[in-house]
């Protein structure tokens, strides 16, 4: 994608000059200036206009499916030649169904309420002041991500519908696909009479541009990283800009002493194997010793039949044919692959302690028919998403009815869990008076 497709003429000139000079700070500043101009228009636009932009982008994605697939094939071939892991390639690969899903996600976002201008609270003071807290756009959002080209569409769409401008820095492995998708998002904006600069792709693979984004305090309002631990750790270490992030998704299934055996088998296979490369994939199974002998062999056999390798503690290895011994590092590992760790534990307290020690506060689930145990799990497990009798693969903004998400935030500030359109807003206070003055 060229700078000319995402910026005003002046902005494009500044971007080109910064690119030629290899000045990453100047490049990000130029992108921010274009983004600020676009964001001002987006913040003042009508909800119907922003919805029209997303519908137009969705239509363009559907119309250009063949071109997207061709570019994605080139990206995938290059990634494989570079020895990228199978899980990484899976996240990079687009299919007709995934492309249609991206377009459908944009359409679904438009079915939500307008995130901007929502009255979050309202009250009156004894002196007659009327005070309201109202949702406003965050501003310019930087999204740094690795292999998933769908992030280009999800992030761009969610930022736009909430009146924000997005500066996207995709991974080099997805540059052809992501660049083209960003062009289509810009074309959707233009079709609705909005500035193309609402979605910009950083036009370089040089990692210095990431550092410039992280240092852009006072320019970029928030950074959202989507990728592996090394990327997120770098962002959290270097950023001088607020960050929405999670380090990894070490998700647990706890099979309680009152679990239904058939549910345990079905949920274990789906939570691990539906898509192993997503952050909501289960990475560890904990099972109560009282039911391990009756349930674990069937769970292990079903996982093995689905192609999953099992690393277990000594009790698990005795019950699961083909399981290999786990070590301390396994409990801390987000495999993102067809591997799962299994541990037999003694009761709820030990399960909760394991999750607290080794978990990443992403998504954890209990499988039980005991309502008291289920409610205790929901109350005591302090993860962004806590589930009862449901696959951890449902840890997704689209599945939550949020249309789409930029990611799952596991921190405790501002946004937690799926980060959708409503989470990409701040607020301001509107105070209406009738001549009141303050005494004293």
Image (spheres, rainbow, N blue to C red):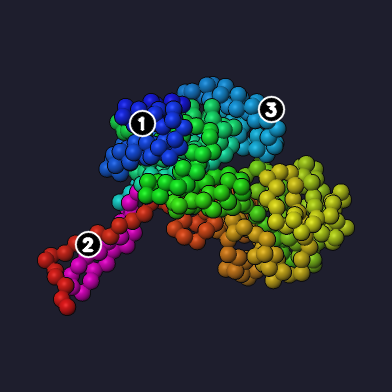
Say whether residue 74 is left or right of residue 131. Answer: right
- Contact, CB < 8 Å: mark 2 with mark 1? no
User: Between 390 and 329, which is closer to the camera in this rendering?
Assistant: 329
Q: Which mark is residue 14?
A: 1
Q: Residue at image x 72%, y 69%?
A: 350
Dot 1 crowding, Cα within 10 Å, few <14, some 14–19, many 20+: many
Reply yes or no: does residue 429 show up in magenta.
Answer: no
* Residue 227 lies in quadrant: top right
Image coords of residue 171 (percent x, y):
56, 36
Pick whichever of labels 2 and 3 is earlier in the sequence.
3
Q: How far apart are the alpha carbons under marks 2 and 3?
A: 60 Å
Q: How far apart are the alpha carbons under marks 2 and 1?
A: 40 Å
Judged from the image, the secondary structure of the residue bearing numbered disc 1 is helix
Q: Residue at image x 24%, y 69%?
A: 124
Farthest residue in the front direction? 21
Q: Which residue is mark 2?
A: 431
Q: Which residue is mark 3?
A: 81
Image coords of residue 395 (percent x, y):
57, 50
Dot 3 crowding, Cα within 10 Å, few <14, some 14–19, many 20+: few
- Whether residue 322 is visible, yes or no, is yes
User: Between 320 and 356, which is closer to the camera in this rendering?
Assistant: 356
Image coords of residue 382 (percent x, y):
58, 64
Residue range (magenta): 118-138
Pick whichever of labels 3 and 1 is earlier in the sequence.
1
Q: How far apart are the alpha carbons under marks 3 and 1?
A: 35 Å
Say whether residue 129 is left or right of residue 349. Answer: left
Numbered-mark total? 3
């Amino acid at each position: 994608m060229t700078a000319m497709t995402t910026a005003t003429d002046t902005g494009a000139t500044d971007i080109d000059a910064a690119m030629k000079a290899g000045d990453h700070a100047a490049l990000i500043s130029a992108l921010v200036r274009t983004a600020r101009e676009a964001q001002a228009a987006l913040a003042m636009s009508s909800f119907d206009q922003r919805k029209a932009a997303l519908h137009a982008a969705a239509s363009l994605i559907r119309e250009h499916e063949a071109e997207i697939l061709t570019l994605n094939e080139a990206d995938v071939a290059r990634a494989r030649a570079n020895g990228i892991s199978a899980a990484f390639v899976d996240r990079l690969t687009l299919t007709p169904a995934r492309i249609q899903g991206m377009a459908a996600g944009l359409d679904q976002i438009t079915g939500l309420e307008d995130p901007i201008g929502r009255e979050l609270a309202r009250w009156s003071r004894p002196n007659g002041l009327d005070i309201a807290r109202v949702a406003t756009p965050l501003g310019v959002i930087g999204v740094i991500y690795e292999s998933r080209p769908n992030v280009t569409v999800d992030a761009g769409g969610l930022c736009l519908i909430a009146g924000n401008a997005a500066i996207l820095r995709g991974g080099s492995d997805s540059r052809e696909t992501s660049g083209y998708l960003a062009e289509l998002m810009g074309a959707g904006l233009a079709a609705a009479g909005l500035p193309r600069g609402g979605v910009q792709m950083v036009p370089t693979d040089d990692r210095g541009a990431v550092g410039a984004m992280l240092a852009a305090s006072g320019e970029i309002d928030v950074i959202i990283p989507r990728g592996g631990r090394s990327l997120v750790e770098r962002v959290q270490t270097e950023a001088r800009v607020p960050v929405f992030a999670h380090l990894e998704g070490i998700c647990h299934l706890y099979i309680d002493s009152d679990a239904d055996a058939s549910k345990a088998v079905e949920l274990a296979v789906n939570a691990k194997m539906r898509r192993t490369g997503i952050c909501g994939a289960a990475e560890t199974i904990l099972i109560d010793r009282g039911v391990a002998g009756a349930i674990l062999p069937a769970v292990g056999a079903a996982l093995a039949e689905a192609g999953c390798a099992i690393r277990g503690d000594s009790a698990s290895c005795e019950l699961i044919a083909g399981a290999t011994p786990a070590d301390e590092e396994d409990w801390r590992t987000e495999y993102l692959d067809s591997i799962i760790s299994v541990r037999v534990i003694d009761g709820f307290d030990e399960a909760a302690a394991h999750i607290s020690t080794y978990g990443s506060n992403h998504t954890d689930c209990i499988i039980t028919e005991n309502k008291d145990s289920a409610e205790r799990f929901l109350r005591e497990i302090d993860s962004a998403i806590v589930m009862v009798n449901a696959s951890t693969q449902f840890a997704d903004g689209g599945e939550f009815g949020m249309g789409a998400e930029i990611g799952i935030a596991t921190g405790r500030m501002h946004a937690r869990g799926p980060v959708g359109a409503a989470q990409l807003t701040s607020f301001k206070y509107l105070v209406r008076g009738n001549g009141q003055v303050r005494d004293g």
